[in-house]
Image: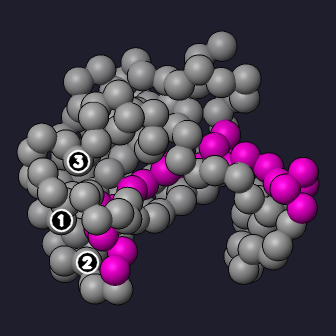
Amino acid sequence: MSNLVLQWMADELKDFGLNVFENPGWQTYDNPTIYTYDPVAVLNHHTGGSSILANYPDPPYWPPERLKKSCNITIRPDGRVDVLNAGYAWDSGQGDPKVLARVKAGLPPLVATDTDPDDRVSGNPHFIDIEVQHLGTGGPIADVQYEALIGTNVVLL
């Protein structure tokens, strides 16, 4: 079974007017998984870490193989939207099943509660994952990056 459900992303993002870079092979890249990839929402987060911007803008801040596995899209500080993976990504992680149930029901996802690690569920099959290339040290992201993040969410949703 193919989980390549996002092959439309780059064209739609470009049609919206965003500066899009298509990582070579993104349309056919899908991480191996036992899950069916059926995204119901978008997960936005920053990359974090002190070395994230060390090589900006090129080479990529992570090796291409890690990028493809980690997320579907990354947004660079200059506002460029890098499309990396048309299928299942590994970066949404484990979370509270009550939060996931609310998201799937179209309700606001309230703050996650502490759950027993045995009760956690994977968000990976349920989210399109966007990583904003940012240190996460409290400073704001650039306006152009924020605008690209908003535009990308509009297109995906």
Precedes in sequence: disc 3 or disc 1: 3
Q: Quadrant of residue 105?
A: bottom right
Residue in the image at 70% along x and 29% along y: 36
Residue contact at pointers 1 and 2, CB within 8 angstroms: yes
- Mark 1 Cα shell of 10 Å, populated few (<14), some (14-19), many (≥20): many
Helix, strand or loop at label 3? It is loop
Q: Which residues are magenta?
A: 116-137
Helix, strand or loop at label 2? It is loop
Q: Which residue is mark 3?
A: 61
Question: Which mark is nearer the camera, 3 or 2?
Answer: 3
Q: CA distance from mark 3 to mark 2?
A: 17 Å
Precedes in sequence: disc 1 or disc 2: 1
Residue type highlighted by circle 1: Pro
Q: Which residue is mark 2?
A: 141
- Mark 2 Cα shell of 10 Å, populated few (<14), some (14-19), many (≥20): some
Residue type highlighted by circle 3: Tyr
Q: CA distance from mark 1 to mark 2?
A: 7 Å
